[in-house]
Amino acid sequence: MDRFDAMQAFARVVETGSFTKAAETLHMGKTSVTQLVQQLEARLRVRLLNRTTRKVNVTADGAAYYERVLRILADVDDAETSLSSATALPRGRLRVDVPSPLARMVLVPALPAFHAQYPDIQIDMGVSDRMVDMIDENVDCVVRGGELTDQSLVARHVGDLQLGVYAAPSYLAQAGTPLHPRELEDTQHRVVGFLWVRSGKTFPYAMQRDGESLTVQGRYVFSVDDGNAYLAAGLAGVGVLWLPDYMAKPHLARGELLPLFAGWQLEPMPLYLAFPPNRHVSSKLRVFIDWIVGLMEQHAPIAERPGA
């Protein structure tokens, strides 16, 4: 028995709650994972897992051992990436999930520079706005806009998305140009609805100007849960959009979108990078986080808070 492989297999079974899922994420057969854990238990003379036909639960001894195993695996990972010049650069596979517009407009264009610096890091990037089960899907980290509701995750505030209100010239030619945000609640106007996965509902936006504060949701005939499709609908003249500056900028420059409600301000949308608390921040994840932070300093710097 390879004790390192056995510890990896045991840790992944604990994290996924399943021998089958653990085997899939480790790219091993289920039988091999089962045998490794059984051999580990035989060596330790302790039952680490309780198995039923439906699920796998860690025992009290197994939970204590799991915490020690995580530290051992982390130490091994750090040692392998710092021994010599041949292994000094981070390497290995990194699984991440990011919003689709951020991937298309910011991250993917910057990837050549990242890979020039870290040629041995393989990035598997999921591009979505959906909820991700980071343990079951073996995802190392996610980047998400808005306040995080999962308090179990370790989150780092990496940026603030400055928001504005925009519409395509074709929409304004048909519906007229609204002069006050309240007009978006009128029957003649409509917005493109963005469905937030966490709630399955569209999101109202708080706006303020010269002491006047209001919340606008607007009427929609089309809603979508993907940022790229949301932008495409606005460009097609389906309705009014609320967009981060980085998404709106190139379309403003080409005249494909026009800004609305000059002088009105919206609260910035925080951008977070999050990962599971039991996930070791390996050297490859650490440099990826630093890369994200650097990009956000360029495209969506953290806004100064009053009193800060």
Image (spheres, grey):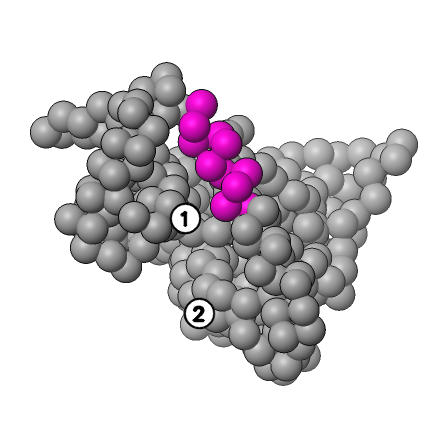
* Residue 19 rendering spot, x and y as whole percentages: 22, 41
**Measured along the vertical axis of the image, is residue 56 above or below residue 253?**
above
The residue that appears at 29% across and 25% down in the rendered structure is 45
In percent of width and height, residue 285 lies at: 58, 56
Q: Main secondary structure of the magenta part?
A: helix
* Residue at (40, 24) in percent of width and height: 63
| Left or right relative to 171: residue 30 | left
Q: CA distance from mark 1 to mark 2?
A: 49 Å
Q: Amino acid at mark 1?
A: Phe
Of 200 and 171, the residue lying toward us: 200
Looking at the rendered structure, which numbered label has been put on residue 78?
none
Per the image, is 233 magenta? no
Q: Which mark is residue 232?
A: 2
Whether residue 56 sits left or right of residue 269 in the image: it is left
| Along the viewing direction, whichever of 202 and 213 lies nearer the viewer | 202
Mark 2 crowdedness (10 Å alpha carbons): few <14, some 14-19, many ≥20: few
Give the residue displayed 41% in from the left and 57% down from the top.
128
Q: What residue type is disc 2 on?
A: Ala
Q: Can you identify the residue that label 1 sits on?
A: 4
Q: Is residue 288 visible?
A: no
Dividing the picture into quadrants, the one containing residue 54 is top left
Q: On the rendered image, what quadrant is the C terminus found in?
A: top right
Q: Where is residue 123 shown, x and y percent of the image?
A: 48, 67
* Disc 1 secondary structure class: helix
Q: Dot 1, how many residues are within 10 Å of its Cα: few (below 14), some (14-19), or many (20+)?
A: some
In front: mark 1 or mark 2? Answer: 1
Range drawn in magenta: 64-74
Q: What secondary structure is found at the residue carrying circle 2?
A: helix
Q: Quadrant of residue 179?
A: bottom right
State left or right for residue 212 relative to residue 269: right
Q: Residue at x 33, y 45 (%)?
A: 6
